[in-house]
Image (tube, rainbow, N blue to C red):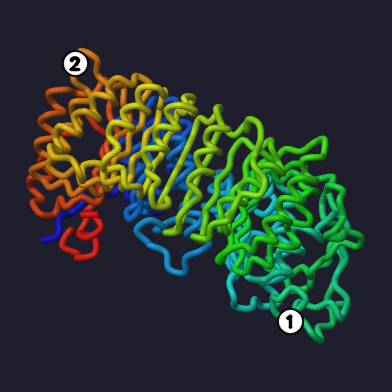
């Protein structure tokens, strides 16, 4: 039999569903605090946002209400840790705004009783990055009204992603895409630009032919020029009217009614890809390019020296970048290095043909502070030019496929970077006769300033002594040993792990430790020794994801941690472990850990053959 609602429940529901605006925020905030707390779980995001300032003044927390919405969107992904309600509110608004624009079917458990115009105008204040794709239809309404919502986006969006696919766009959508890119880049606050497109000319237009003076394309300059559909035979002059583009040139909009506008494509009258003068309004600080064919990088490399404001450049290709393109990139970097107002400090290149070409890039632009490279091939090239002198690199990342890396060059590069504070090495394989022990010994001798060290997918099964040596000389704050097979060769696995724990305890600067995919299994309880007295570790984050920790193993770890509780609440990641093999024991262990830990966990089906295989790697 259905339970009848109480009068209080009926009033709460009426306020939420129909009469929130009529009652008003002032009247709601004047309710007793206990009643407000009961009402909060019923409110939607717009209502919650409107009450937020008044609730903060009354000392009433909305954290759990915002977290309910956040968990709905992040249920299948790793959740972030939020310490402030405001940060959580902004993240919820951003996720809902993205879903509204990118998802055809909305979950009405979240969107029930939400006014879409009210939500957009509310959420848009929290949106700091947007993504444009081949389907621009959801963005049509942002260009209607006065003032348009696009004006609000221009003030808040700092990161713009453009992700285009193979299929051709309609004329209307391509016009809208170009118009919104123009508005956000030339009149907005965008500082970080990420582009992924299979169309060569699109990238060229965007980075080389954009400027402040625009004109509509002539009849023979149609959309096929850019590979995005066609407008052949379209009588522009009959359908265009000139409007003022605020803070910029006049633009022409097609007369299609107040609810939709379709600007024609533009190009700059006097801007060429080979020009070497910077754009006067250039403000892009971070540029990330992903292309299908390496040849698409050619024009981009040519105009690289014009980007004085650029501090970070990332080049990604679906296939290996030709050696000739790397040399062209080095020339562009050398040209940029000669400019008095250059700003570039970070470079990421994927896929580099071979490691020796790294020396060409480092020699061309010696002011890099951060370098991230991925190598694709096993081909070995003799180094033609050695790098001389100390390098100012502070952050370095190496990643490779199954190919072998030039061992001597890698070690030599590390010795030339005494200021290195962050190093990430992943999936590298060395030539026969070389050993990863030499890499660790080089770090201990030449890179004592390291505060962050990440080693992933490396066989360090017989390198415990060298790891301990690095821990003794470096003041590490973050250490990641991911899939490094730490205990594989140990005769006494618990004792080997205890030696590592003792070295980690002697490192007072350590705050973050990741030991995922190392098959710690039943030995995980040894890690509780990190917090034993008289000198407990100040660790704040511990990741033991995918270590085949079974429920009974977690119980033992929880008991050990209760005997040696951390100094402050520990963020503990135990995702992708087979807790489903004994759910009751697993949940009991989690409950024992909660007083000491912020837990990251998930419901993982360990009986899935592939997942079980991964956990045993």
Q: Residue at x 38, y 25 (%)?
A: 59
Mark count: 2
* Image location (x, y in percent) of residue 260: 69, 68
Q: Residue furthest front?
A: 433
- Residue 342 against residue 262 in the figure, above or below: above
* Image location (x, y in percent) of residue 507: 33, 21
What residue would you read off at disc 1?
Answer: 230
What residue would you read off at disc 2?
Answer: 533
Left-right relation of 164 to 110: right
Pointer 1 or 2: first along the chain: 1
Residue contact at pointers 1 and 2, CB within 8 angstroms: no
Crowding near the residue tagged with mark 2, few <14, some 14–19, many ≥20 C-alpha atoms within 10 Å? few
Q: Is residue 15 visible?
A: no
* Image location (x, y in percent) of residue 441: 40, 32
Screen quadrant of the N terminus:
bottom left
Q: Residue at x 42, y 52 (%)?
A: 431
């Amino acid at each position: 039999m259905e339970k009848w609602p109480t009068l209080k429940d009926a009033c709460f529901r009426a306020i939420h569903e129909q009469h929130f605006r009529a009652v008003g925020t002032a009247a709601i905030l004047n309710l007793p605090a206990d009643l407000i707390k009961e009402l909060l779980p019923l409110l939607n995001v717009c209502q919650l946002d409107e009450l937020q300032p008044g609730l903060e003044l009354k000392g009433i927390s909305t954290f759990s209400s915002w977290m309910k919405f956040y968990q709905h969107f992040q249920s299948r992904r790793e959740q972030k840790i939020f310490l402030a309600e405001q940060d959580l509110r902004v993240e919820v608004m951003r996720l809902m705004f993205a879903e509204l624009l990118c998802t055809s079917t909305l979950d009405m458990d979240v969107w029930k009783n939400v006014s879409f115009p009210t939500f957009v105008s509310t959420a848009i204040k929290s949106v700091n990055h947007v993504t444009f794709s081949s389907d621009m239809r959801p963005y049509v309404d942002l260009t209607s009204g006065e003032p348009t919502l696009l004006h609000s986006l221009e003030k808040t969006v700092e990161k713009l992603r453009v992700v285009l696919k193979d299929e051709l766009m309609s004329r209307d959508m391509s016009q809208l895409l170009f118009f919104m890119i123009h508005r956000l880049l030339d009149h907005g606050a965008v500082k970080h630009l990420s582009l992924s497109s299979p169309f060569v000319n699109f990238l060229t237009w965007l980075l080389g032919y954009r400027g402040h003076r625009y004109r509509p394309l002539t009849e023979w300059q149609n959309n096929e020029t850019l590979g995005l559909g066609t407008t052949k035979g379209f009588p522009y002059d009959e359908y265009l009217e000139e409007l003022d583009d605020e803070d910029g040139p006049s633009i022409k909009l097609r007369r299609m009614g107040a609810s939709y506008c379709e600007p024609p494509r533009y190009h700059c009258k006097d801007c060429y890809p080979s020009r070497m003068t910077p754009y006067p309004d250039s403000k892009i600080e971070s540029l990330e390019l992903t292309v299908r064919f390496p040849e698409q990088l050619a024009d981009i490399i040519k105009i690289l020296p014009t980007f004085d404001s650029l501090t970070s450049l990332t080049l990604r290709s679906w296939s290996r970048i030709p050696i000739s393109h790397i040399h062209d990139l080095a020339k562009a970097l050398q040209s940029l290095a000669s400019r008095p107002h250059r700003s570039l400090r970070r470079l990421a290149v994927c896929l580099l043909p071979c490691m020796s070409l790294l020396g060409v890039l480092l020699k061309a632009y010696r002011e890099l502070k951060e370098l991230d490279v991925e190598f694709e091939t096993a081909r070995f090239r003799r180094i033609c030019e050695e790098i001389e002198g100390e390098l100012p690199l502070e952050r370095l990342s190496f990643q490779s496929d199954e190919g072998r890396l030039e061992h001597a060059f890698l070690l030599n590069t590390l010795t030339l970077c005494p200021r290195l504070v962050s190093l990430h090495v992943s999936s590298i394989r060395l030539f026969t006769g070389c050993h990863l022990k030499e890499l660790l010994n080089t770090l201990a001798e030449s890179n004592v300033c390291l505060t962050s060290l990440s080693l992933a997918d490396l066989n360090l099964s017989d390198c415990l002594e060298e790891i301990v040596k690095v821990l003794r000389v470096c003041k590490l704050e973050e250490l990641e040993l991911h899939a490094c097979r730490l205990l594989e060769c140990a005769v006494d696995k618990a004792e080997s792990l205890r030696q590592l724990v003792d070295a980690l305890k002697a490192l007072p600067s350590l705050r973050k430790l990741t030991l995922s995919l190392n098959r710690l299994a039943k030995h995980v309880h040894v890690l509780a020794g990190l917090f034993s007295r008289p000198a407990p570790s100040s660790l704040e984050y511990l990741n033991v994801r995918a270590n085949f920790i079974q429920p009974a193993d977690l119980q033992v770890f929880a008991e050990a941690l209760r005997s040696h509780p951390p100094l402050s609440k520990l963020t503990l990641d135990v995702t992708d472990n087979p807790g489903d093999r004994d759910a009751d024991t697993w949940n009991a262990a989690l409950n024992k850990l909660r007083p000491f830990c912020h837990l990251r966990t998930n419901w993982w089906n360990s009986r899935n053959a592939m997942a079980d295989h991964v956990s045993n790697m």
